[in-house]
Image: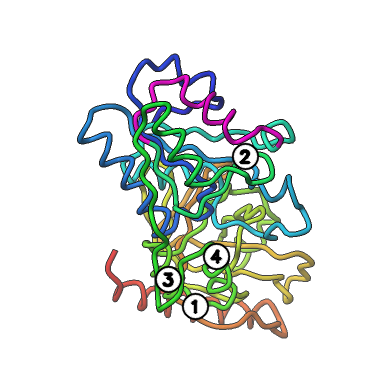
Amino acid sequence: MLICNGLDELAALEQPLHLALGVFDGLHAGHQAVVERAVKAASQNSGLPGLLTFDPHPIRVMAPGKAPASLLETLDHKARIASDLGIQLFIPLCFDAALAAMEASEFIARLTRAPVRTIAVGEDWRFGHQRSGDVSLLRHEAEARGFRLEAVPPLMCDGERISSTRIRQAIRDGNLSAAARMLGRPYSLTGTVMPGRQLGRTLGFPTANIDTGELQLPPDGVWAVRVNDSNGQEWDGIANLGHRPTLGGTRRLLEVHLFEFSGELYGRNLDVRFEQFLRAEIPFPSLDALQVQITEDAQSARHILRGLSR
């Protein structure tokens, strides 16, 4: 997938562009409906389907006190999801004070210096200085600048509008089936494997410590998981999310043990899909007792994962 980090780079592509615009936290089913319009327009009219987004989340710059404490995916994860949806051009604009101060009409003027043929947005999307840009302004700009506007209504799930806020709450609650319905895919998170204390090796269950950054996490406990790497390899496994009270842990960690794997994973990006909650995290009287419980947890996870389709 082609990546452009600034508006000025787009004009050099010299291809008709069909762009989905938005923050797209989670790239959930409602966002996917917007992306689908851009991909379809590129297929029908020739050109490059692209997704333009912002990093960091704009509200973290404009109103940090109101910003969500956690996000639904990393920027790299968002790019991979977009690629799976048919996007060929990814445009992650750095959202800073200068971009926040840019008037909506100026933003569109700069964007359309490139051969933009389609712009797809959610019909309630707001952009530009003081959020002055909206679909009404985009319709005016579309007529003046000769691009097609696709304004997509919100998507509903269980009688309510799908939103990133609802999805974060479902994940916090451990209601991953509801999160999956709204995401349009199973919930997962992506992080880099970091060096750890290697205590899992002494128990016979070596683990990969995943850097979860500012991602939204499900409830603490032991989970049956499926894990993918960037090369498409997949493993079943078991994960512990929490503070590891038996081992004297002081901070929240995600540790994953992969079945049928040996080798080093440091520095690799892993996508962890939480399939089923097994039990809460509890302290054990000894490492021997913890080892016995992990063995039982692993057996349960293997049984559960064998029964699930991939």
Tag in front: 2 or 4: 2
| Region in magenta | 101-118
**Kind of element beneath mark 1:** loop
Which tag, 3 or 4, sits closer to the chain's start? Answer: 4
Which tag, 3 or 2, sits closer to the chain's start? Answer: 2
- How many residues crowd around disc 4 within 10 Å: few (fewer than 14), some, or many (20 or more)? some
Q: Is residue 209 left or right of residue 160?
A: right
The reply to whether callout 3 and callout 2 are in contact (CB within 8 Å) is no
Closest to the observer: 174 or 41?
41
Which residue was labeled with disc 2? 128
**Kind of element beneath mark 2:** loop
Which tag, 1 or 3, sits closer to the chain's start? Answer: 1
Which tag, 1 or 2, sits closer to the chain's start? Answer: 2
**Kind of element beneath mark 4:** loop
Position of residue 231 measured from the top left corner of the image (x, y, whole percent):
38, 41
Which residue was labeled with disc 1? 175
Q: Amino acid at mark 4?
A: Phe
The reply to whether callout 3 and callout 4 are in contact (CB within 8 Å) is no
Q: Is residue 132 left or right of residue 262?
A: right
Which residue was labeled with disc 3? 275
Tag in front: 3 or 4: 3
Marks 4/1: CA–CA distance: 28 Å
Which tag, 2 or 4, sits closer to the chain's start? Answer: 2
Q: Amino acid at mark 2?
A: Gly
Q: How many marks?
A: 4
